Image (cartoon, rainbow, N blue to C red):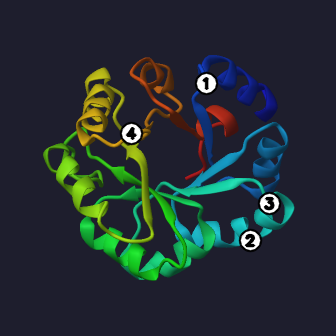
Amino acid sequence: MGIRENIEEIKANSKGALLLAVTKNVDLPQIIEAIEAGVTDIGESYVQEAKSKISILKSKFPKVRFHLIGHLQTNKVKTALELFDVIQSVDSFHLAEEISKRATKPVEIFIEVNTSGEESKFGIAPEKAVELIGRITGLPNLRISGLMTIGNSTREGFRLLRELRDRAGIMGLKLSMGMSHDYALAIEEGSDIIRIGEGIFGPRRI
């Protein structure tokens, strides 16, 4: 199937979850095809890779929203704020503080939680997540929109993120969880945003 058909199939199975198209290593023509097929939100992992793409896409599609879903270093916060509408990978108070300091308007953020416990994955430890959320709510120019986890295809991991969301006690927080291989399971556990790359564009180029 092509990009349009893939998008239609995923949307038909998404049960209302937002489809975030992950465009790491995807060329502009394919991204444009996805947007023209109905994608409204784009996710990129690296600030530098996204820079040239987003400048072109924003001029063609001003209503599309761009999400940073990869790890953000504090020295790239200024550039990230110029490019992205949402930062889904806030995993420390230090990073949140830097975003707050650099922001010139309210910034939508997600707290990234390492629900798998893998040392190779970024994200705040689950047992520290609720405390971090509480600290960040006191910072100006930040709006916590939800929680995000990456690289965990187990029901327990998705359920843990949902439980942390409920414990945070903030109304309206969303869950960003589930990728090409596990989004159906994530939706069963309450995902609001699914992040799909290969399921739309095919196998990723290395």
**Cβ atoms at labels 2 and 1 below 8 Å apart:** no
Q: Amino acid at mark 3?
A: Pro
Q: Nearer the viewer, mark 4 or mark 3?
A: 4
Residue at (75% x, 24% y) in the render:
8
Residue at (77% x, 54% y) in the render:
63
Dot 4 or dot 3: first in sequence order is 3
Q: Nearer the viewer, mark 1 or mark 4?
A: 4
Could you give the CA–CA distance between mark 3 and mark 2, rounded to whole angstroms?
10 Å
Dot 1 or dot 4: first in sequence order is 1
Q: Is residue 52 left or right of residue 88?
A: right
Residue nearer the viewer, 90 or 46? 90
Q: Does residue 145 sit above or below 163 in this rendering? A: below
Q: Residues within 10 Å of mark 4 (few under 14, many from 20)?
A: few
Residue at the spot of label 1: 16
Q: Residues within 10 Å of mark 2 (few under 14, many from 20)?
A: few
Dot 3 or dot 1: first in sequence order is 1
Q: Amino acid at mark 4?
A: Met
Could you give the CA–CA distance between mark 3 and mark 1, rounded to whole angstroms?
23 Å
Residue at the spot of label 2: 55
Position of residue 83 measured from the top left corner of the image (x, y, whole percent): 62, 70
Q: Secondary structure at mark 4?
A: loop
Residue at the spot of label 3: 62
Q: Quadrant of residue 34?
A: top right
